Image (spheres, rainbow, N blue to C red):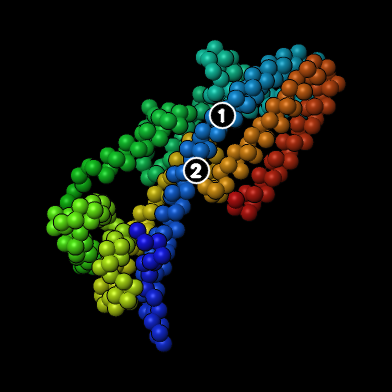
């Protein structure tokens, strides 16, 4: 490929580009942007996953051990009740509900999960399994919005690997399955766009056919180009075919500028479809990342900032773990426990006010 050659319609001297020519250039640019974004996601996610496993998960193990101890200390204090007012007991119940609920899902062994589930039921005033069913329903609804498919009940939403495997299998099955009913006859415009795509491919195939080339090096080059052309045509990627034409020196920017208005309209139709498919692919990749790592669904994410997100998570978890380790030995003292519970109530109110404010502004 010759990187310096750009597939775009250059503005002729003393004239302006037509609306269709401007649209062509805009579509080419936006497709390139979406491809770059998709490549960034595909590069960033494995790096995020590897570093998270290496640096964050050990911290999570430590935090989980301390959280179990905190649940037990608070449960013992609530059972004793001596010296605790209603506000204190309510605060303990809320803290145990949050901690035990998370541990009932993530604890490493069944006995500990059962213990945490029991503590949740005692202090939440509801049943963990029933509340979990509501959470699963919300997660399945989010998956349906992101991927356009229903997640069956036998798929464990707490297992990112199982969820992603199911989604990939469903997408592959949808792509291979025959339609339930005969497809509608393509519109004339769609037929003409397909014809334009086919004509570009045929010109390439004629120019690049390796069997017609006597020079071994040139035959190898054309074989590689022909393989790319076959893949591009099979996936309806007009932009790739036009880029290959540029590489094979079958077209130049001047020829693009002289395309008929009708031909350009057909090209723009195919390119717009390609752009739409790329946008869906980027959205699905981002959605899979959000589901795998249990992130807020409306949080704006950029591949280049994923490591910043992870560093923030590591720093916050390190701080939370440090605080838990410091607080636990002090909570056996009733006055200290009551002061600590008062601080927790203030923190809860602040978080609730922040959530209410974000909700007010639709975020």
The reply to whether residue 36 is in sight is yes
Q: Is residue 154 above or below residue 284?
A: above
Q: Nearer the viewer, residue 166 or 180?
A: 166
Write down the quadrant of residue 156 in the picture.
top left
Q: Residue at x 56, y 29 (%)?
A: 54
Q: Horizontally, is 25 left or right of 192 in the view?
A: right
Q: Residue at x 38, y 27 (%)?
A: 154
Residue 159: image location, x then y, percent: 45, 28
Q: Which residue is mark 1?
A: 54
Residue at (37% x, 59% y) in the render: 275
Residue 295: give x, y in percent of width and height.
55, 39
Q: Sequence order check: which comes first, mark 1 or mark 2?
A: 2
Does residue 331 lie above or below 234 as drawn?
Answer: above
Label 1 neighbour load within 10 Å: few <14, some 14-19, many 20+: few
* Mark 2 lies on residue: 44
Q: What percent of the width, then of the height, locates residue 252?
A: 31, 71
Q: Quadrant of the N terminus?
A: bottom left
Instruction: Give residue 133's mark.
Output: none
Residue 135: % across, % down: 51, 33
Distance of label 1 from label 2 (alpha carbons):
15 Å
Q: Which residue appears at 42% of the width and 46% of the height?
A: 284
Q: Residues within 10 Å of mark 2 (few under 14, many from 20)?
A: some
Quadrant hosting residue 236: bottom left
Front residue (pair 305, 97): 305
Give yes or no for contact between labels 1 and 2 (Cβ–Cβ under 8 Å). Answer: no
Q: Is residue 175 left or right of residue 289?
A: left
Q: Quadrant of residue 148?
A: top left
Secondary element at image label 2: helix
Can see residue 261? Answer: no
Q: Secondary structure at mark 1?
A: helix
The furthest residue to the bottom: 14
Furthest toward the left, the residue is: 212
């Amino acid at each position: 490929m010759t990187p310096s050659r750009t597939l775009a319609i250059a503005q002729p001297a003393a004239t302006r580009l037509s609306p269709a020519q401007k649209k062509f250039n805009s579509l080419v640019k936006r497709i390139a942007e979406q491809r770059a974004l998709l490549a960034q996601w595909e590069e960033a996610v494995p790096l995020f996953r590897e570093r998270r496993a290496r640096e964050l998960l050990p911290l999570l193990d430590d935090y989980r051990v301390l959280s179990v101890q905190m649940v037990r200390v608070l449960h013992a204090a609530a059972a004793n009740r001596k010296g605790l007012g209603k506000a204190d007991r309510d605060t303990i119940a809320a803290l145990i509900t949050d901690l035990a609920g998370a541990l009932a899902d993530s604890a490493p062994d069944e006995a500990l999960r059962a213990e945490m589930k029991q503590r949740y039921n005692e202090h939440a005033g509801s049943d963990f399994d029933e509340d979990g069913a509501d959470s699963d329903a919300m997660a399945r609804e989010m998956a349906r919005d992101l991927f356009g498919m229903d997640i069956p009940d036998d798929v464990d939403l707490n297992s990112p690997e199982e969820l992603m495997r199911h989604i990939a299998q469903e997408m592959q099955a949808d792509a291979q399955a025959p339609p339930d009913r005969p497809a509608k006859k393509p519109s004339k415009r769609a037929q003409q766009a397909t014809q334009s795509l086919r004509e570009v491919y045929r010109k390439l195939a004629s120019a690049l056919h390796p069997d017609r080339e006597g020079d071994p090096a040139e035959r190898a080059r054309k074989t590689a180009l022909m393989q790319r052309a076959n893949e591009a045509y099979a996936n309806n990627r007009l932009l790739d075919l036009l880029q290959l034409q540029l590489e094979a020196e079958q077209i130049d920017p001047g020829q693009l500028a002289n395309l008929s208005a009708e031909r350009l309209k057909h090209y723009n139709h195919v390119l717009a479809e390609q752009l739409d498919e790329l946008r869906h692919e980027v959205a699905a990749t981002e959605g899979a990342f959000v589901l795998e790592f249990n992130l807020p669904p409306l949080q704006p994410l950029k591949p280049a900032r994923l490591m910043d997100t992870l560093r923030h998570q590591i720093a916050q978890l390190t701080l939370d773990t440090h605080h838990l380790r410091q607080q636990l030995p002090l909570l056996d003292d009733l006055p200290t426990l009551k002061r600590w519970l008062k601080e927790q109530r203030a923190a809860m109110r602040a978080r609730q006010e922040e959530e209410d404010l974000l909700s007010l502004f639709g975020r």
